Amino acid sequence: MLDFLDKIDIIEESSYGSLMSTKVEPYLAKRRRDDFLLTFDGKKLHYEAYEKTLCRGSVVILHGFTESAEKFREVAYYLRKAGYSVFSLDLRGHGKSHHDSEVKERVDIDSFDTYAEDLNLFIEKVVRPVNGDRKIYIYSHSLGSTVALLYLMKYPYAVSKAVLSSPMICGNMGMPTAVAGTAAKLLCTLGGKRVPAPGRCVFDPGQTAENSDATSKARFDYYHEKRKREPLYQTSGPSFSWVSASLKARDYLLDESNIRMLRSELLIFKPEEDRQLLGEYTDRFAKLSHTEIKNVKNSRHEIFMSGDDVMKWYIEEVLEFFS
């Protein structure tokens, strides 16, 4: 195993807020380039770049649904300290990137292919010119993993390895997926594409760690305070169009002819408790693609917001996989 933990200390929960504010954030701020990429359809996507001249390669961070690059500052810190250039993208409809929805708390999209094409443009126009001939890796969470897989099926030789952390092969709709799919298709046909899907579609400033997808209160509280201060981080739910597009993406990801297109080495991290995803679909994808699953005890959907013991193991496994 890597000895990086002797060189890079995990930010411990007991002093998490103060260490993030006085150590991690200043370190990243000195190295961060905030910029925007113009997409194929003329929209602006925000990203954070932590470039390193003598690097081991580049890691692209892809966040989950209703999240942002800002949420993955701790992960970016570990990757940058481990010797990688790091590029963290706000997917469209999220963070500081363009929002198709007029309501900032809701995410709209008609096809997940748009996410994949955005990612391709980002890697080709932003990452590869800096990275040169070094290897490129992807670290992705939830929706970010869906985007990564769609991209890797269309551009199979672009990336060497990809971490799929709690990959969203199929989200938990709170109802049978067939019912959700039929309802979404019907609403879209009747002109309700932008109607918010049932569930939590409004930001809740009073949410607590106990009812969140994190097991670390310190990590949850730190980012939740940022969300409360910044409306752009308060995206909270999907439209029916987004739900319909996600189910089409699920079918695409589970199509064996598409899976056979994959050439990148993949690694799945699956939490012990996940209220956001239907785990049987993750298992099915892993079996069809012959991808290893690392089951993570004492964790919820947001594995990167777990307690210290889990985080130490998790980050070490990620870096070991990329090495």
Image: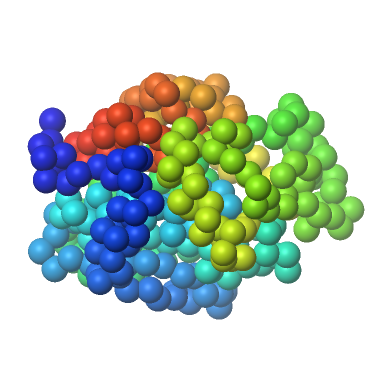
Q: Is residue 310 left or right of residue 230?
A: left
Query: Please, is residue 60 above or below residue 43 in the view?
Result: above
Q: Residue, x 14% and y 68% (percent of image)?
A: 53
Q: Quadrant of residue 52?
A: bottom left
- Where's residue 29, x and y in %? 30, 69
Q: Residue, x 32% and y 73% (percent of image)?
A: 33
Of residue 220 and residue 42, the one placed in the foreground of this image is 220
The colour scheme used to paint the residues is rainbow
Q: Is residue 11 left or right of residue 224?
A: left
Of residue 6 and residue 158, the one placed in the foreground of this image is 6
Q: Quadrant of residue 28?
A: bottom left
Q: Quadrant of the C terminus?
A: top left
Query: Please, is residue 315 above or below residue 189 in the view?
Result: above
- Where's residue 163, x and y in %? 34, 40
Do we see residue 304 in this rendering?
yes
Looking at the image, which residue sits at the far right?
190
Q: Quadrant of the N terminus?
A: top left
- Where's residue 61, x and y in %? 37, 53
- Where's residue 128, x and y in %? 27, 66
Q: Residue, x 34% and y 59% (percent of image)?
A: 21
Query: Please, is residue 88 above or below residue 222 in the view?
Result: below
Q: Residue, x 72% and y 44% (percent of image)?
A: 200
Q: Is residue 40 left or right of residue 100?
A: left
Of residue 88 and residue 224, the one placed in the foreground of this image is 224
